[in-house]
Image (spheres, helix red, strand yellow):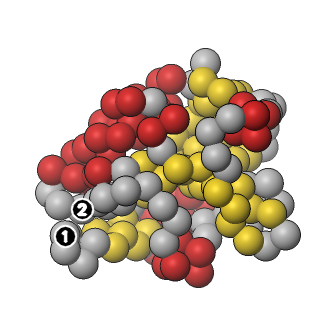
Amino acid sequence: MIHISETVLDEARSFFEDCGAQGCEGTALIAAKNDLADLLVIPDQRATPHPRCSVEVTDKGKRQLATALGLDRTYVARIHSHPGLALHSDTDDRNPSLTFEGALSVVVPFFGLGLRNGLDACALYELRAGRWVLVELGPDRVRLVDIR
């Protein structure tokens, strides 16, 4: 069970809405200490605006991600926005930010506006046996994540 702080989701929403105002997607990683995910790391990134919509973490951003955490924290989830509905695209599947079993991927719909309705308005995927599996609302999702 990962407990994601409301502050992290508020920071993510603000960032994604700012990107969306430019017609762009955004991406970030969520880090946790023990089971509390209370750090959002937004790396330097280059976005291609709508209608092509893509986002790439730059080399500088990769270094930022590599150096952002202390020994007591680990990345537990990728969170990123899409221009429309929340779903894991083929590109998301091919370019995972996290590759360990049980990693989470949160897809925020409508250029970040979906987070205004909370995490339940987003798609949540878990990496299982090397595949991203959609975690539907209900008991499986409750088992994985909650908001604090």
Rendered location of residue 53, percent (x, y)? 28, 72
Query: Which of these two is toward me, 64 or 118?
Result: 118
Query: Which of these two is toward me, 72 or 78?
Result: 78
Q: Amino acid at mark 1?
A: His
Classify residue 96 as left or right of residue 92. right
Q: Read off the residue under disc 1.
A: 50
Q: Amino acid at mark 2?
A: Cys
Identified at 34% across, 31% down, the residue is 116
Vertical comparison of 92 with 78: above or below: below
Rendered location of residue 82, percent (x, y)? 36, 59
Quadrant, the C terminus: top right
- Any part of residue 144 in sight: no
Q: Read off the residue under disc 2.
A: 24
Vertical comparison of 105 with 73: above or below: below
Q: Are marks 1 and 2 in contact (CB under 8 Å)?
A: yes
Q: Residue furthest left?
A: 22
Q: How far is disc 1 from disc 2 in space, using C-alphas?
A: 6 Å
Vertical comparison of 15 with 62: above or below: above
Rendered location of residue 144, percent (x, y)? 75, 38
Mark 2 closeness class: few <14, some 14–19, many ≥20 residues within 10 Å: many
